[in-house]
Image (cartoon, rainbow, N blue to C red):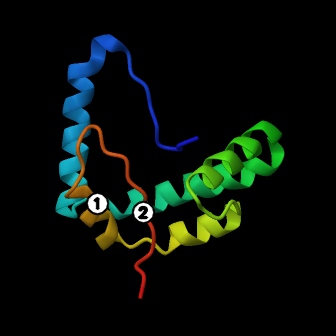
Amino acid sequence: MPFFSRGIDGGAISRARKVIRRLYAEVASGTLDPAALRGALEDQRYRLESLQDHRAALIGWVQYTVALGLDPSPAAHLERMRAVTPAAVRGVGRRLALDTTFFLRPETP
C-alpha cells in the first residue's frame, strides 16, 4: 500500500515523464518549496489517522509494514516522517529515476 504510487493514462506518458523529471530536478536542487514537505507530512498525518476509521485500509497498512519489516504503528511512522529533514529529501532527490523506489527515514547516529 505505497502512499505515493500513482497511475497515468497511457496517452499521457511523455507529458508525465517531463513533469516527473522536472519535479525530481527541483527536489535534488534543494529548491523545493518548504511548504511541500509540510504538505506531505500533513497528507501522511491525515492518511494515518484515517486508518482507524477504515478496517480494510488498516489491514493493508499492517500487511505493508510487516512485509517491509517496519513498525506497524501508524503513530510511530508519523513520528519517523516528522524527523525527515529537507537535506535528506535533497539527498534522495539526487538519486531519483523514473523507476525508483525509496524510503525516507531519520538519520541514524
Other-residue count near label 2 (Cα within 10 Å), few / some / many at <14 / 14–19 / ≥20: few
Badge 1 marks a residue whose secondary structure is helix
Residue position for label 2: 104
Residue position for label 1: 92
Q: Position of residue 52 (x, y in %)?
A: 81, 51
Q: Classify the position of the C terminus by image quarter.
A: bottom left
Quarter holding residue 68: bottom right
Kind of residue indicated by mark 1: Val
The answer to whether mark 2 and mark 1 are in CB contact below 8 A is: yes
Kind of residue indicated by mark 2: Leu
Viewer-side residue, 108 vs 80: 108
Query: Relative to 106, is 16 above or below?
Result: above
Q: Classify the position of the N terminus by image quarter.
A: top right
Query: Relative to 9, is 80 above or below?
Result: below
Residue found 44% across the figure and 32% down from its top: 6
Residue found 20% across the figure and 40% down from its top: 21
Query: Relative to 47, is 38 above or below?
Result: below
Quarter holding residue 90: bottom left
Say which label, 2 or 1, has the lower sequence index: 1
Classify residue 97 as left or right of residue 62: left
Other-residue count near label 1 (Cα within 10 Å), few / some / many at <14 / 14–19 / ≥20: some
Q: Position of residue 33 (x, y in %)?
A: 31, 59
Classify residue 16 as left or right of residue 66: left
Q: Which mark is residue 70?
A: none
Quarter holding residue 8: top left
Viewer-side residue, 80 vs 101: 101
